[in-house]
Image (cartoon, rainbow, N blue to C red):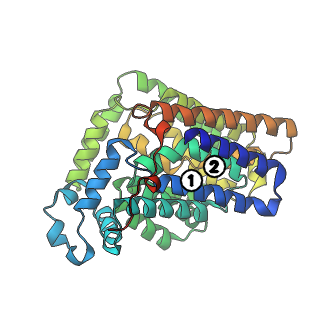
Amino acid sequence: MIWILLILVCYFGILYGNVVRESQKKYLAIMILIILCILSGTRYNMGGSDYYIYQDIFEGSPILSEFSLVNIQDSWLIKNYEFGYIFFNSVIKSIGFTFYGFTLVHSVLFYLCMYYGLKRYINDYYIFILFFLYKLFFYNTFISMRQSITIAFFFYAVHLIEERKTVKYFVLCSIAATIHNGAWILFLVYFINRISLTKQKVFCLNMIFIPTLILSYIDNPLLDYLSFIFENTPFADNGQRIGTFIDTAGLSSIDIFHTLEYLFIMILVYVFFEKIMKIDKNAEVIIKVFLILLPLFTLFRDYEILTRIKDYFIFTYPIIFGYLCMIDNKKYRTVVQIVGVILCTFGFFKFAIMFNNSEMMSYKSYLFQGISIFQ
């Protein structure tokens, strides 16, 4: 499947760049997204141990007629997982779907939110899909199922930040936070619209955070205080869980390759800052969201609980690359596109080969297993 997918995406790129008219590009992209949605939603027993954990959650969730806080308050579900995610499982289960139907519904929700939420920001769907396959496709549509729902909500909510629709944004974030605790960070993200963006500020932020990379290679007493702070929050259970993750710093660090990759894009953003800002009226909010990643790839790169939230903001990579490809310099544009393709292809296969003993290299769909999505 992986090789077929690569050929399909390459063919899509040829059509997108050389054959179809501008007015048809959107429909070609939608077709590719539908194919990816089906691949994600009909995967069969794929996604490592998380897949089976989510299957157990679905099987253990009560149908809506039996759902109440009284019934689930002593359940292993509510002790380990968020109320909103359990409720979502119950809704899908009550409709009459099996877990295989749930994975398809989950996939459709993710791709719909991604498309409708980000379409105003995407100028080059081919670049976007390449980076999506590299950065988000496997982990957020095959493995993670709680956080990926909240990521999808954030895709849909980005325009609310730009339009300063505070109430709608906070309501959506509140719903997301009941599904995955990591979504609480999204409340703070809203306030980026209060900060003006200049090239000088981009430079200063980099000068502050890039030197902190050295802290990931030595003892870092400053961050040890985070564990104490979280463990003494009013939300004791979640606080202790977060504190435990922080105590395990260094066991699941962000690969230095990903940090260097981010800094490479940052250099391009800084060098072509003025041109990018002129290309698209939405560029400012995208760069602001992109800058949120800076401390995550430098100061906090050793802390798993903090680096997990990077997936909320990774979607800015392909959008920024799309801006770069629109700069009026044919030679430069070609170089950027080639670098993007090589980077994404390498990262895509690296994940497919290295994750869970190359599980992703042998894709299986339940469409060919004689399995029904209905109970």
Q: Is residue 281 visible?
A: no
Above or below for 176 versus 95: above
Q: Are marks 1 and 2 in contact (CB under 8 Å)?
A: yes
Q: Is residue 47 visible?
A: yes
Q: Nearer the viewer, mark 1 or mark 2?
A: 1
Front-most of residues 266 and 104: 104
Above or below for 163 versus 203: below
| Residue marked by disc 1 | 36
Quarter of the image for the N terminus: give it.
Answer: top right
Q: Picture coordinates of residue 152 (x, y %)? A: 49, 59
Please report whichever mark, 1 or 2, sits nearer to the chain's N-terminal start: 1
Q: Picture coordinates of residue 276 (x, y %)? A: 75, 48
Q: Amino acid at mark 1?
A: Leu
| Residue marked by disc 2 | 129
Q: Residue at x 59, y 59 (%)?
A: 34
Q: Residue at x 44, y 54 (%)?
A: 148
